[in-house]
């Protein structure tokens, strides 16, 4: 029997990387966060349907397969763009020992399946490893903009000091994304294996030769002591930063090393003092039951202006687990650019 089913396209890591820019990813991720929290279709708002992801341990908990389906409805990839729908599913593995292979592989490897939202037909499979690195940093960038920088009269122009704790894939994308998006004057890096922090420092000095002070710290406390914004993304099972290490007043923390096993990279006393926001309350319920913190709400609610933002000089934490809607909207923006479809998407320099 003949069918009209078309072969899906495949886009490699190199093809995807060619398209990714911080302005494209930041705006796609902001749309995903806004859509998260509204699950009902209505004419005016975007919405997202993203069931809790499945986690399949592969032998033990250091090796896992995650399946992340998501439908984002009635959203725009740019201000003047058409309202569109995206159906996607990311399949991602986290194998903590990949970095020890010769040659090393990223611990987190992903592919994103993008479907036609009208027929369900698979349109393409694209490498999602780069997208995972970029979109996670972008979610932290959006959180920093709304939960921290909007408190100040200068807004996103405010000069900030950033600390990066953990200089793996996430630490690197957070450092680059923060420096590309905001007025970062000072960045301090700490990594358990110091050579990785040194490598990142060299990369940042080459990329930002003017006006950025880059330091490598020997201890996490040295890196965070003056920081306004801290980005932490590790596999640490014990806290790497605690309340006494932080400067007083306004501090914002993006913690991405999430999950039942190792969310403890930030100490309990910081959670006790902080106002905590998350990417998705559904994900927290499923994957962070052991987190002892009062969760103030979803970041998307703050962006939609329904959430109340505390402005009294307290610490804010964005606890990020990663959501399917982010992968869906970024994959859609990449696909549209690669195929010239819906081409009112936003571009910018790397
Ligand atoms: N929220 C989200 O959306 C996402 C979250 N993640 C999470 O982010 C975290 C980092 O992922 P990724 O950057 O891809 O991983 P990498 O393997 O690239 O980096 C891991 C980092 O963690 C450090 N680390 C590991 N164990 C310890 C420890 N016991 N104490 C201190 N540092 C430690 C490593 O240091 P060293 O170099 O010395 O080994 C390295 O800096 C993981 O927890 C991952 O699950 C990842 C993707 C998305
Ligand atoms: O959201 C995501 O893709 C992941 N979160 C933790 C591992 C991968």
Image (cartoon, rainbow, N blue to C red):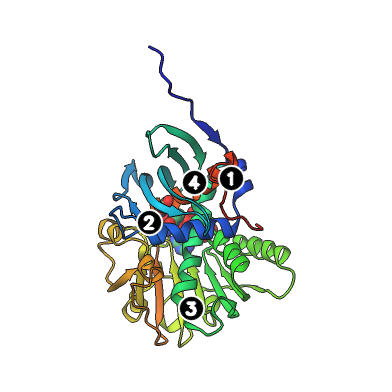
SS at mark 3?
helix
Between 61 and 291, the one nearer to me in the picture: 291
Between 147 and 332, the one nearer to me in the picture: 332
Mark 1 vs ligand 2: CB under 8 Å?
no
Q: Position of residue 199 (x, y in %)?
A: 65, 60
- Whether residue 232 appears in this view of the structure is no
- Whether residue 165 appears in this view of the structure is yes
Label 4 packing within 10 angstroms: few (<14), some (14-19), many (20+): many
What is the spatial separation of the Cα atoms under label 4 and label 2, in whole angstroms?
15 Å
What is the spatial separation of the Cα atoms under label 1 and label 3, in whole angstroms?
31 Å
| Residue bearing mark 1 | 337
What is the spatial separation of the Cα atoms under label 1 and label 2, in whole angstroms?
21 Å
Q: Nearer the viewer, mark 3 or mark 2?
A: 2
- Residue at left 25%, top 62%? 289
Image: 199 above or below 271: above
- Residue at left 32%, top 48%? 53
């Amino acid at each position: 029997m003949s069918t009209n089913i078309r072969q899906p396209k495949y886009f490699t890591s190199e093809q995807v990387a060619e398209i990714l820019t911080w302005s494209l990813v930041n705006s796609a991720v902001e749309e995903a966060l806004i859509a998260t929290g509204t699950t009902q279709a209505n004419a005016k708002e975007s919405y997202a349907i993203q069931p809790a992801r499945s986690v399949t341990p592969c032998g033990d908990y250091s090796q896992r397969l995650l399946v992340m389906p998501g439908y984002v409805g009635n959203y725009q990839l740019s201000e003047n763009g058409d309202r569109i729908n995206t159906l996607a599913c990311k399949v991602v593995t986290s194998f903590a020992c990949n970095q020890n292979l010769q040659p090393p592989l990223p611990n987190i490897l992903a592919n994103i399946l993008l479907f036609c939202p009208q027929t369900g037909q698979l349109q393409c499979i694209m490498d999602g490893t780069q997208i995972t690195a970029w979109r996670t940093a972008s979610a932290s960038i959006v959180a920093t903009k709304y939960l921290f920088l909007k408190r100040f009269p200068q807004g996103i122009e405010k000069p900030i000091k950033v600390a990066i704790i953990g200089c793996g894939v996430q630490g690197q994308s957070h450092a680059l994304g923060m420096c590309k998006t905001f007025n970062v004057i000072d960045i301090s890096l700490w990594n358990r294996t110091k050579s990785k922090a040194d490598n990142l420092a060299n990369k940042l000095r080459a990329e930002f030769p003017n006006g950025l002070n880059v330091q490598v710290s020997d201890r996490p406390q040295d890196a965070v002591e003056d920081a306004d914004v801290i980005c932490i993304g590790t596999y640490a099972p014990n806290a790497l930063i605690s309340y006494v290490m932080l400067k007083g007043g306004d501090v914002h923390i993006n913690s991405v090393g999430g999950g039942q096993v190792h969310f403890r990279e930030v100490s309990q006393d910081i959670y006790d003092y902080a106002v905590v926001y998350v990417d998705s309350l559904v994900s927290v319920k499923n994957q962070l039951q052991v987190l002892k913190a009062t969760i103030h709400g979803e970041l998307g609610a703050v962006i939609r202006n329904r959430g109340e933002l505390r402005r009294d000089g307290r610490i804010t934490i964005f606890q990020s687990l990663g959501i399917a809607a982010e992968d869906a909207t970024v994959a859609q923006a990449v696909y549209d650019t690669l195929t010239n479809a819906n081409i009112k998407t936003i571009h910018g320099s790397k």
